Every structure is written in structure tokens, then in C-alpha cells.
Image (spheres, helix red, strand yellow):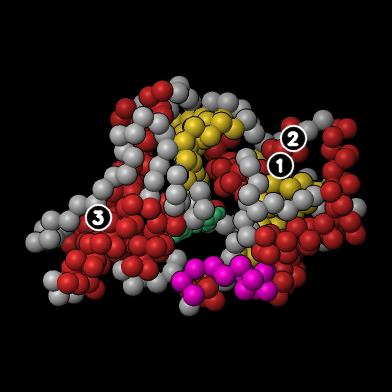
């Protein structure tokens, strides 16, 4: 079957067309129009500006996705769209487009949770058909930091989550403190890598805290870590130390502290819950240092657990991950239920705080 998916929950206008067979998903097109440059001047995403850009871009992106996939709308068997969580003005452009297409072409329509999409980005890779349940997923994005147990497809139990900032948000805020621009994740990790390559022993012995590392649960907190970076920068400025020369060191030390907490909490969860697979998901999953540390530490302590990372082109927001989740949801539905999806063009709701 052919699935057309739309994702507009934040600052990427994304449409994908995939072809599915039995167990495999072939991505025919994965078009992403990013608004990063527009929002960079504000230091973060401005919801109404995002919506205006989505509106401008959605039809050209749709045309491009169809052209690349060499498909026409009548050939599509299922439409799916992110219906939450996210910025309401942004989400509405995607859901309204999906509902209009579903109504006009009389297609079944499925609403997908954005984080479910990130998790299912792991299933896009054919070798990831080997993903076995039960599994533990670590979701790390700009809006979420969660440890989620899955006993089977779509059976979620959130066992831990951030009590304040998401880890991606902390990367973005620290980048702003260090004058590194937006989004912060890629630039912080690049600066940190510069530092680790130089292997220079700085005269500044800076260490940042690991919030909630020893708490008796699987929750996280990243707001205090970000504030510790801010206080450190203020202290250095008072001492007339040039921050720009210390950007790589500060980026490295921040990343080290954030990743340490993510890895240690993951190991703690794996000690309590017996699982067959571990998945990483969300925009921060592109971080090489995080991947390396998770892989090393998990395989050392739990050699039998299979470790999966999404391929780099599907770590950030994209619509192929939404198509992947839609495919597995469709497969799980009985025929009678599938028929009701033809009415979804009038029923589908957009929710800013949609729960998994
Ligand atoms: O999943 P995503 O694309 O959007 C949300 O659902 O939030 O995640 C975006 C987040 C941003 O905070 C961005 O700074 C972060 O992912 N990010 C990274 C890296 N690439 C993107 N964080 C750390 N290291 C990276 N390489
Ligand atoms: Zn996302």
C-alpha cells in the first residue's frame, strides 16, 4: 500500500510517501522544508510565524513529494498526519491539509502522536524488523525526555520523564548562553567534538552537575544544568576570561553531564526491567557522543539487548516516521475499524498536549 504522511508540529513542513509490503517500508519521498533560518533570528520557534510558513510551503512540499515518489493522489491508500503534541497553529496547517485531502479523495485518515512517530523512525530501516518486544525507548527531543517501556506495538508505559526542560531544549538554551546560535544541538556537539579532538587540558577545571542522577526514580531534570552553565559563564566574564575561547570546553562539559545522566538513567531502567531491545528516538538521537556512550555502556552490561538507533536522516522531524507509525497502526486494526477511518476527515482532533 501507499501511505502519504504529513508532519507540521513545529518548524519543519514535511511530507512523505512510502510504499509498504508485508513487513517492509520503502520511502519513496521524504520532503522537508525547514524554517530554521527564519526562527534563528528569534532564538527559538515563534508559533504564528511557523504556521504562516507551513501555509506557504505545504502545497509546494506536497507537489514535490508526489513528484519524487512518482505517485498521484488517487493512488494513495492511506493518509496520516501528526495531530499532536506540538504548536497548535503549526499542527492545524498539517491536520487541515490532511483532512481536506482525505475528504476530497475519500481516503482513510489516521492521526499519529509525534513521539510515536519518533519511536517508529527506528522501524523504517529494514534490518530493524528485528526489533523485539518488550523494549525500552529513550526519547530525547526538543520537547520531550522520556524513558518508555513498550510491551508490544503501541503499548506504552512512561517510566520516567523530565520534570522541567527537555534535553534538546537544554542544548538550545546553553547554545544561546554561549552565543552559538539556534538550534543548539548540532553546534554544541560540534564544539564539544573540537574540544575532545584537541585533548587539551584546560587550566579551568570546570565540572557541571548531573541533576537527579541518584534520585530513586527514572525522572530527569535539565533546567539546573543549564543554569549552572549560565552561572559559570557569568563567573568567567567577571574574571575577564574570554568566553569565545572557552566555548568548546563549556560545550564539551555540558554535553558530558547531560549524556551522563541520560545513559545512567537508561542503565538503571534496564537493571529493573528486563527487555530484549533498546531504542533511541527524537532529534537529540543524532548526537554521536550520546550514541557512542549508550552503545558502549549498554552492550557492556547487557550484551543480549539489541540496540537500535534511527538512521540519521530520520532523527529530526520528518513525515516518513509518521508513515511508519501509521503503517503499524493500520496493520493492527481489524477491517471494521479500518472502514471507520474514512470518516476521520470530520472527526480528527488536533491537540497541543496529546498524551501517548
Ligand atoms: O525531535 P526534534 O527534531 O523536534 C522536537 O520534536 O522537539 O528535536 C529537536 C531538538 C533540538 O532541541 C535540537 O537542538 C536537538 O534536537 N538536536 C540535537 C542534535 N541535533 C538536533 N541535540 C544534540 N545533538 C545533536 N546532534
Ligand atoms: Zn520531534
Q: In which quarter of the image is residue 233?
A: bottom left
What separation in Å lies between label 3 and label 2 (alpha carbons)?
Answer: 45 Å
> Residue 294: where, in percent of width, then height?
36, 40
Q: Is mark 2 on a helix, strand or loop?
A: helix
Could you give the CA–CA distance between mark 3 and mark 1, rounded to whole angstroms?
41 Å
To which quarter of the image does residue 32 belong? bottom right
- Secondary structure under the numbered disc 1 in the rendered image: helix
Q: Which mark is drawn over residue 253?
A: 3
The residue wearing badge 2 is 331
Q: In this view, does 150 lie above or below 202?
A: above
Question: Label 1 belongs to which residue?
Answer: 327
Residue 47 part of the magenta segment: yes
Q: Which of marks 3 and 1 is in front?
A: 3
| Near-viewer residue (202 or 230) | 230
10 Å crowding of disc 3: few (<14), some (14-19), many (20+):
many
**Ligand 2 near label 2 (Cβ, under 8 Å)?**
no
Label 2 near label 3: C-beta < 8 Å?
no
Quadrant (top left, top right, bottom left, bottom right) of the N terminus: top right
In the rendered structure, which segment of residues is drawn in magenta?
42-54
Is the C-beta separation of discs 2 and 1 under 8 Å?
A: yes
Q: Which of 325 and 124 is in front in this view?
A: 325
Query: How many angstroms separate mark 2 from mark 1 (CA)?
Result: 6 Å
Give the mark, 3 or 2, whose residue is nearer the N terminus: 3
What residue occupies the far left of the structure in this picture?
203
Query: In this rendering, is residue 81 above or below 213?
Result: below
Left or right relative to 105: residue 242: left
Q: Earlier in the sequence, mark 3 or mark 1?
A: 3
Local crowd size for mark 2, using a 10 Å CA cut-off: few (<14), some (14–19), many (≥20):
few
Residue drawn where x is 37% and y is 36% of the image: 265
Amino acid at each position: 500500500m501507499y501511505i502519504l504522511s504529513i508532519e507540521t508540529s513545529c518548524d519543519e513542513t514535511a511530507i512523505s510517501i512510502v510504499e509498504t509490503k508485508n513487513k517492509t517500508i520503502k520511502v519513496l519521498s521524504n520532503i522537508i522544508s525547514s524554517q530554521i533560518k527564519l526562527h534563528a533570528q528569534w532564538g527559538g520557534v515563534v508559533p504564528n510565524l511557523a504556521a504562516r510558513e507551513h501555509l506557504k510551503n505545504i502545497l509546494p512540499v506536497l507537489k514535490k513529494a508526489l513528484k519524487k515518489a512518482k505517485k498521484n493522489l488517487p493512488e494513495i491508500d492511506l493518509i496520516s498526519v501528526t495531530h499532536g503534541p506540538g504548536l497548535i497553529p503549526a499542527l492545524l496547517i498539517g491536520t487541515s491539509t490532511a483532512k481536506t485531502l482525505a475528504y476530497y479523495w475519500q481516503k482513510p485518515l489516521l492521526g499519529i502522536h509525534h513521539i510515536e512517530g519518533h519511536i517508529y523512525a527506528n522501524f523504517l530501516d529494514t534490518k530493524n524488523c528485528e526489533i523485539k518486544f518488550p523494549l525500552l525507548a529513550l526519547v530525547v527531543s526538543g520537547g520531550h525526555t522520556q524513558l518508555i517501556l513498550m510491551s508490544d506495538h503501541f503499548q506504552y508505559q512512561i517510566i520516567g520523564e523530565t520534570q522541567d526542560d527537555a534535553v534538546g531544549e537544554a542544548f538550545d538554551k546553553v547554545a544561546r548562553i554561549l552565543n552559538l546560535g539556534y538550534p543548539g544541538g548540532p553546534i554544541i556537539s560540534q564544539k564539544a567534538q573540537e574540544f575532545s579532538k584537541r585533548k587539551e587540558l584546560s587550566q579551568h577545571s570546570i565540572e557541571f552537575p548531573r541533576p537527579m542522577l541518584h534520585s530513586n526514580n527514572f525522572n530527569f531534570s535539565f533546567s539546573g544544568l543549564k543554569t549552572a552553565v549560565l552561572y559559570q559563564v557569568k563567573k568567567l566574564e567577571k574574571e575577564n576570561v574570554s568566553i569565545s575561547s572557552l566555548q568548546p570546553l563549556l560545550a564539551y562539559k555540558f554535553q558530558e553531564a547531560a549524556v551522563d545522566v541520560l545513559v545512567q538513567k537508561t542503565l538503571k531502567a534496564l537493571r529493573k526491567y528486563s527487555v530484549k531491545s533498546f531504542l533511541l528516538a527524537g532529534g537529540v538521537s543524532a548526537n554521536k557522543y550520546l550514541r557512542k556512550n549508550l552503545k558502549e555502556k549498554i552492550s557492556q552490561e547487557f550484551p543480549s539487548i539489541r540496540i537500535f538507533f534511527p538512521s540519521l536522516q530520520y532523527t529530526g522531524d520528518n513525515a516518513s516516521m509518521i508513515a511508519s507509525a501509521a503503517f503499524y497502526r493500520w496493520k493492527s486494526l481489524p477491517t471494521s475499524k479500518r472502514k471507520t477511518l474514512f470518516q476521520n476527515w470530520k472527526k480528527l482532533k488536533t491537540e497541543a498536549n496529546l498524551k501517548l
